[in-house]
Amino acid sequence: MNRKVEKSRFFFEQDMQETVGEVSTLKPKPWGPDVKLDVVGKPVTRFDGYDKVSGTATYTFDIKLPRMVYARTLRSPHPHAKIRAINAKAAWEVPGVLDIISSDNTKSIPWYRNTSMIFDSHLRFEGDEVACVAAETLKSCEEALRLIQVEYEILPFVVTAGDALKKDAPKLYDSGNVTWGKPETYKRGDIKQGRMESEELVEDTFSTSVAIHNATEPHGSVVNWEGDKLTVWDSTQAVFRVRDSIAAALKIPDSHVRVIKKYMGGAFGSKLSAGKYTVMAALLARRIGRPVKIILDRREQNLAVGNRPDSVQRLTAGAKKDGTLTFLTHDATGAGGAYPSSAGCSWPARTMYRCANMKASDTTVYINAGPGRAYRAPGHVQGTFALESLMDELAEKIGMDPLTFRMKNLADTDQVFKLPYTTKLLKESYEAGAKEIGWQKRNRTPGSGVGPVKRGTGMASQIWWGGGGPPAYATLKLNRDGSAHVIAGTQDLGTGTYTIMAQVAAEVLDIPMDRIAVTLGDTGTCPYCGGSGGSTTAASVTPAVRDAAERMLTKLRSAASAILEVSETDLNYEKGTFTVKTDGKKKADIGTIMQKMREQALVTTGARNANPEGFAINTFGAQFADVEVDTYTGSIRVKRVVAAHDIGRVLNRKLLENQFHGGIIQGLGFALMESRVIDPNTGKVLTTDFHDYKVPTMMNIPEIKVIIVSEGDTRISAVGAKGIGEPAMIPTAAAIANAVYNAIGVRLRSLPMTPDKVLNALEAAGRKS
Amino acid sequence: MNRKVEKSRFFFEQDMQETVGEVSTLKPKPWGPDVKLDVVGKPVTRFDGYDKVSGTATYTFDIKLPRMVYARTLRSPHPHAKIRAINAKAAWEVPGVLDIISSDNTKSIPWYRNTSMIFDSHLRFEGDEVACVAAETLKSCEEALRLIQVEYEILPFVVTAGDALKKDAPKLYDSGNVTWGKPETYKRGDIKQGRMESEELVEDTFSTSVAIHNATEPHGSVVNWEGDKLTVWDSTQAVFRVRDSIAAALKIPDSHVRVIKKYMGGAFGSKLSAGKYTVMAALLARRIGRPVKIILDRREQNLAVGNRPDSVQRLTAGAKKDGTLTFLTHDATGAGGAYPSSAGCSWPARTMYRCANMKASDTTVYINAGPGRAYRAPGHVQGTFALESLMDELAEKIGMDPLTFRMKNLADTDQVFKLPYTTKLLKESYEAGAKEIGWQKRNRTPGSGVGPVKRGTGMASQIWWGGGGPPAYATLKLNRDGSAHVIAGTQDLGTGTYTIMAQVAAEVLDIPMDRIAVTLGDTGTCPYCGGSGGSTTAASVTPAVRDAAERMLTKLRSAASAILEVSETDLNYEKGTFTVKTDGKKKADIGTIMQKMREQALVTTGARNANPEGFAINTFGAQFADVEVDTYTGSIRVKRVVAAHDIGRVLNRKLLENQFHGGIIQGLGFALMESRVIDPNTGKVLTTDFHDYKVPTMMNIPEIKVIIVSEGDTRISAVGAKGIGEPAMIPTAAAIANAVYNAIGVRLRSLPMTPDKVLNALEAAGRKS
């Protein structure tokens, strides 16, 4: 594996850095197809269900501390400017105002990988932080913000990647507008050779819009100093990462920052790193000696806390008439906003299909807009839309069914790393999905339906990293009454982590689910786990829980053997009780064993094993969509989506479906409506709320059918989960786009496929009804 | 060891049950006199110092949750009554009132070891719980309490142990007024034989008053349900015990209750078990679906949450002229209040001195007053006062210096369990204390001083259990920046547990104290530790911390060896860095090692080893007091106290002195002023605040000198601490009483030695000035 490739694999380093490690502790037999499980895999109702529907669940927003005050941020109204002077005199006069910080009175603290700082006087997007006010009430904060007078030097701005790459474009940084200075590139084989071998060629350009995470719960923190130690309640996907960032910013030891997150109303990648707001709140809290709550509003969500960068993607591919793919190129450019981030759209193309000749590049460009951030399968969602559209085009060109074409080019090894997969059930996914959607009934000739409302069916494939990895630890505490407590430093983003961890503990210890509690997301008290990103949480953490539970069982078995005076192999264990095989009356339950051991609570800690060497670990799948396109109005209605995936072991059927529903709905929004719009004349964002930034509602949601073709992946861990958060969303938009083509016979290469684009495309193709 | 003895040893079962266990994990060499320590033992400033003086420390009282409401308790105004009817109609009308619970609408929940229940209709003391109100404000609560109409059937009451033992006394329970039905007794040898061998005899009766813990921070909880799980912030000495009690009361799994305690303003034994108020708050919170805060006031502290039972103690002893103690009897009776508790005053007498013939009994009696509870060295403080007074009397009778007499009868083995001590430096304590106080300068003839203000010097001995024990666990988390986090389920009562745990970790890992954070007191996230009582915390928990730290060092050393490619024995470790012995340039620090291990945080868990078999583990010591008695006013002024003790290893010299100061001041209060007074005519408590219940103030505090004669006790653990919380207080009152006798030549056998008692005694002895 050459270095460049290794580096590029970690295109969103923050998400993936925890997934590599060397700890290996797990001994028990992996849960393969021969093992019958009682709790794991079942549609157990989520642990936090009651809390959430009853309103008793506490989110960061709900934290209220004695003497707590509020903070709000003054943000740049200009896409590009420098601060000449700040006059906060009038703001200080507002009753209730306690403190105002800005570049005027705050030492520089590096931020965004040192490309900026907290209160940078160079403002690079509409929403960049100018000042922060603390006051007794939010109302006082708002009034003070209005009264802060800032003299700006307004600079020329650039808000599209295309413009940013022009020679005379305004520069965001002295080093130029290309992030990292140059594209990230990849190459294997010989494109010329591949081109020569091909009998049909396709080349096309695809584009996608900027999508905003817009999680239900906004970003925010509550901070409290006790002496030189800081506690931060934060809505975050990565408590330890926030801890380390805040400690570094404040120049205090990591151990002096405690980050707590209990419940979360979504994140989708936008809460993987610490926010400037947390540092500002901590600075204010230290200055005024009181706890500070800072919660961002919906406008700030839409401006400043991340997005899925847009893309312009040029792809070319060739095939022989027999369907053999001979070459593939994928060159993508995306606008990562004002602060570092990268897109990585070409990753699926590099390894989805068996193809000897491949070339790819990803260029990320700075523009004067909010920072791009990881967003549910970053790059892959955009790249899959382009790649899978192109594959359909190529299949059509050689007159082959698109599914048959994909089967023909199935890769049996990872094309980049040249490694076999631990498991790969993509073919099975294709077959199961095709059967369920009724693939054979689709339009043989695209656009051939009668009447103004055209029906069509399309599909697309999915690949994503999988299996998680170390380091991830879990502590298990067993009580005398046979109840247990699982503790880990991971996070539940609303995905069900609390529940699946309890299921694994319940499975191994054979105790009822309702006797298990789970504590997560507290750097002060929980053993280390990585950030919850990259679909790694379940796959990384549940094996650690199993390890802890198996260790507990070992401890209990050994004690039971001593107490019952028989060898361990002469004991049966069931439902918290050891029984002597030869004498069913001789038994000892957990309470008895612990009483004899004189222990009030037994504690074990388990760890995630290292991943196996010499294998690629990926999830695979395919989604199929039935759509209706109204050729009068241009509106697209998705009727049904079938998702057939290989994601390793199912841990909880109900939560799994939740994830798929969420991913598919988000994919549908990306395909049909979501788009951040910036006014090119002013550089200002026009879509800063849910009125202007459209997301799917109940009215848009199709029937969804989830089929899992996999069982536990016994190579990767003793639990065998590979991850589902991102796979669920990856192929949705591509499948819908292919279905739309199948319906109307005109290909839309730009997302979202809004009615105006549909009508324009129909008109251009002379197909307007 | 016969069963009776074994049982009696655990006279305050709740405190001691965690100190027995079988876990053995500690390998490293104990810190003996040959080991030089850099941090442990030093007068490190307490971790929580800043928080406390700045007011940022959060106590239970400071917890404020969204939508939180307040609760207050209606308590019986009668010492003994039954509830005939409750009419809360008017109370319900008070604006802001949300709920009222009482025996009318609450299912019975057993409490006080099943002798009572939550909302018992049989009220056994003034302060027994009748109803509990939840309202939006405390004011509404108070108003509602005033409007609840209760029809009481007033019963005859009894408020002294003497009265309670009379045949026709009102009974608190059908089974009679003696707790457990009979006295707890002990006997060895032959008293008759001892009496025959004796050449001088003494027999006397001593009495002590009821003392109230009166911790600065009152008892209280904040409770919050999230679904079927309950979080309790509680001012408690035992988070796990509260968890288990509340779970049992509410019939939910232990793991569904999370108990958190961060800081505490004292407890002294009164917060070792769960309070009814917590259950009532939990019931209210469940009914109204909002968090509830219930904080008791000072009056409730004085009425209802525990006390040191009073005592009437009859002792006899005999000796030969050469000073040999020939027999000793100690029969004590104490009024344990309305709910179970026992006194155990005779324990010091059973084993303090070498004495073949010994007989003892402890009778605990129910009276219509607040429950007796463990209070800093329960029984021992009262018993030591009586025993050590009597020893002085006996020494005087045979014409021997009281210190010489004690040396003569030093026990080299535990007299009850017939076991050698791990260490016993009582003789050394006597010698060091005598030298410091100037024992030779005391009045040869008691009361022989000239002038109205008489000076005197006295001393007394101390014995207490020591060394703590398992189960106690500690988790250590080491970060890449070399900072560390210690986590354990123990509690810091204000004693300095946070600090000493950090010291032990800093010592082993050789990292600065200010890079260590400590989290304690959270059953949701911390590994198990027992309650903080019986002076067991430091001795139990610090070896677990050392174990965790040594395991961490082992982990690091092994990784360093692999990274630097030398054997582990070729490595030096200092200040977070491993250096190759033969090549000082080859080194790896914690950050480098963890980076190479691809670990963000390393975690280890350590456990307290089992105590050695075949040994008794005790602390020993002696205190010496200089007093002045004003024979005009009867007032006693303690001028100086010298405390010389064998308490194993000193962990922090400054905190150690804090503990001794606190214990000695509390002992002084017990000796001179503290006394709960009940009006015998009404059965009502007259001392319910700090105006009527006198405690020492700065004006009363003597010069205090602390001498520690011990180093680490290498037999008990790798840390070698034995405990200091209770030893500090045990001999103070006795030493003051003996000093008073030495000053005025008249013995006061009743505590507190208030001016009236002094003047009456002087008058009775014909010594009134």
Image (spheres, coloured by chain):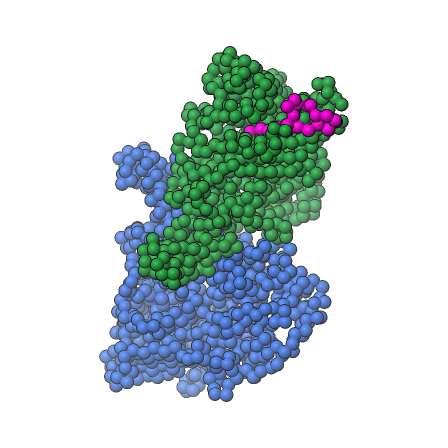
Chain colours: A blue, B green
Q: Is residue B451 magenta?
A: yes
State left or right for residue A567 relative to residue A177.
Answer: left
The residue sitting at the top extreme is: B196
Q: Is residue A398 visible?
A: no
Q: Quadrant of the N terminus of chain A?
A: bottom left
Residue at the spot 42% in from the left edge and 44% down from the top edge: B607
Q: Nearer the viewer, residue A645 or B721?
A: B721
Residue at the spot 53% in from the left edge and 73% down from the top edge: A116
Q: Nearer the viewer, residue A734 or A244?
A: A244
Residue at the spot 63% in from the left edge and 71% down from the top edge: A104
Q: Is residue A655 above or below residue A375?
A: above
Q: How many marks?
A: 0
Q: Which span is picked out in magenta?
A: B442-461
The residue sitting at the front extreme is: B440
Q: Is residue B397 visible?
A: yes
Q: Is residue A305 above or below residue A559?
A: below
State left or right for residue A97 relative to residue A325.
Answer: right
Q: Nearer the viewer, residue A665 or B205?
A: B205
Q: Is residue A279 above or below residue B158?
A: below
Q: Is residue A663 magenta?
A: no
Residue at the spot 64% in from the left edge and 35% down from the top edge: B640
Q: Nearer the viewer, residue A453 or A208?
A: A208
* Percent position of residue B75, x then y: 65, 35
Q: Quadrant of the C terminus of chain A?
A: bottom left
* Percent position of residue A452, x then y: 43, 79
* Percent position of residue A223, x then y: 57, 59
* Percent position of residue B755, x then y: 72, 28
State left or right for residue B766 relative to residue A31.
Answer: right
Classify residue B580 by image quadrant: bottom left
